[in-house]
Amino acid sequence: MAFLEIRDLTKVYGDKVVLDGLNLSAQDGEFISLLGPSGSGKTTALRLIAGFLQPDGGSIAVNGKDITNLPVHRRNIGMVFQSYALFPHMTVGQNIAFGLEQRRFIRKEITKAVDESLDMVRLKGFASRRPAELSGGQQQRVALARALVFKPQLLLLDESLSALDKKLRVQMQLELRQIQKEVGVTAVFVTHDHEEALTMSDRVAVMRDGRIVQLDTPSNVYRAPVDDFVAESLGEANFLHGVVRSKDGSGFVLDLGDGIILPVPTDRPVQVGDTLTVAIRPEDIELAPARSTGSNLVGRVRSIAFAGNTTLYVVEALHREIRVRRPNTAGVKNGVAVDEEVALAWDSSAALVLA
Amino acid sequence: MAQTPRITGSRRRGGSQAWWGLLALPAALFMVFFFAWPLGQMIFRSFMDPTPGLDNYVRFAQTPSGVRSLFETLGMSALVTIICAVVGYVYAYAVRFASPRIAAVLLFAVLFPAGVNLLVRTFALQVVLRDTGIINQLLLRIHLISEHLTLIRTETAVALGMTCMLLPYMVLPVYSVMRGINPEYVQAAAGLGARPIVAFARVFLPMSLPGLYAGGLIVFVAGLGFYVVPQLLGDNAGGRFLSQYTADYMAQAEWGYGSAIGTILLLVTLTTLATAARVLKVGEILRQSFGGAR
């Protein structure tokens, strides 16, 4: 049995089903992200695990023990809020000590544990400061220290990094993950930022309409999405629709219309005549001047947008707009101009077959 | 001609605030003529009438009934402040966590009486509390008592009356501070292992203190100046409020002595306000409570 075991978890508000029989299990020490748009039920799921809400059905078990009906204060779960919720009338040290005091630790042990956890989040000497005197990143670290100091069974993070600016956020992602690994605590992280979910997680649960659509490793949800929703949730994607013309042991050939065919290597069972959608990530597509290659997929460049490390090309082909993203490498010129005819090409493994 | 550039200059800085300030002039003039001037007159008179010097103040200090009325006023205001704090806090808490509809009803119930004339409400209380009032009649009818209780003309009646009049001024600031407290703070405390009562005592209560301080200050200071309630509900043979004591002498045309008592009341009020500003550090408490983690 997994360390965290959530079965058929359901939450209903009036006639709106916010969480529709959620199933999720996590191994000890695993870092799982719940990724989804607002209204997908990810925050509700987290609040149910924390105990702030009571489910209308289903069960939650941690380490083999059912906690579904346990009150919040007896669950032994650490939580980092989006707002951090640091107590403003207490010092940083008092904030961190709070959880230990509830567990009746003796003064000496509390002082020691507070110092150690401040050390862990690199805030040595900040114990007597007030939360209001700290920067956003520092407050975030105090919130993390406060949530971990009493050695909880589970760490819950509710959009915990979204209040930080981008540069700090990326730094905190790595730092948070490193601390989580050191401590070895099982973590559930709610986010709407797909890069964050991919960077930090052992596994990502992509959620929609109160259900988990796909739960897999970051590279699998990115490279083998089950449907167009998952493909788009994890980054940009171009969707191509076609009919299966023929198949053999290594894959099939998809007819995209206009005489364009696309060989797709896959072990997915398909029938000749099936209508299928494949997704292709913009960074997987290569551009070349139309006449220089033998590729039969040709389009016209509609726009070019420089975005620092990449350039985004929007190409009209197959009666649609196809987004192409090329890296900007020093000394290499992408010699393509607006309105120019270009040939599109990609490695056959770049075509992701959706269900 | 010389003024024109200066005006445009101030406009360019985006500040014609000096002109907006003129809008406050009517109110300022009103305050000068009808508040500051008579107040100045009173203070002046307390030192000059009938003879220049501190005679009036010495007389007050040497009159036992005068000093007693000072303590009566302070004591009763403090008592009413404490009662209002306890009752008002519980009430505000109920409003804060009730469903929106019930909260609206509760808020209306506490605010509506504040709109009714104080004299009218005091007479109403008199009707309720008097020997043949509904409380006594009810208790007599169900044979809980054999003869009527003395409810009116007591200290208790004054405390009750003042609490009735002042409760809204406690409930409002407390409720408004409570509304500003993000429920996540209490949830965070529970998540850290605090039982509900501990989460309340260590997180919610300290964070709502600024509301209690503000409400307490308003109630206490307003209580110091009460006249109608102790006059109509109080035991006028015993303790008198400073305001009543003042009026007694004013009625006897002892302007100088009456002014001195009024000035003492003013001094007590100002001292209270100054002490509150320094000791309670209301400003700093507010900053800490709301300028913190967002």
Image: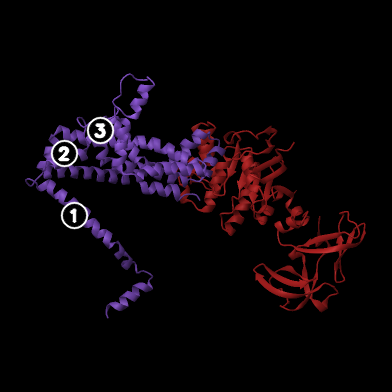
Of labels 3 and 1, the one closer to you: 3
**Residue type marked 1:** Trp
SS assignment at label 2: helix
Image x and y of residue A211, in percent:
71, 47
Residue to which mark 1 is pinned: B37
- Tell me, by letter, which chain the rendering colours red: A
Q: Are marks 3 and 1 in contact (CB under 8 Å)?
A: no
SS assignment at label 1: helix
Residue B237 versus residue B186 in the image, above or below? above
**Residue type marked 2:** Asp
Which of the chains bears the disc numbered 3?
B
N-terminal label among 1 and 2:
1
> For the residue carrying disc 2, how many other residues have a C-alpha within 10 Å: few (<14), some (14-19), or many (20+)?
some
Residue to which mark 2 is pinned: B248
Image x and y of residue B197, in percent:
49, 33
Which of the chains bears the disc numbered 1?
B
Identified at 81% across, 63% down, the residue is A241
Tags 1 and 2 both on a single chain: yes
Q: CA distance from mark 1 to mark 2?
A: 23 Å
Give residue B50's quadrant in the image: top left
Image x and y of residue A246, in percent:
92, 62
Of the chain colours in the picture, the one used for chain B is purple
Numbered-mark total? 3
Residue A295 versus residue B118 in the image, above or below? below
Residue lying at the far left of the rendered structure: B51
Residue to which mark 3 is pinned: B234
**Residue B50's mark?**
none
Quadrant assignment for the C terminus of chain A: bottom right
Identified at 27% across, 62% down, the residue is B25
N-terminal label among 3 and 1:
1
Q: CA distance from mark 3 to mark 2?
A: 15 Å
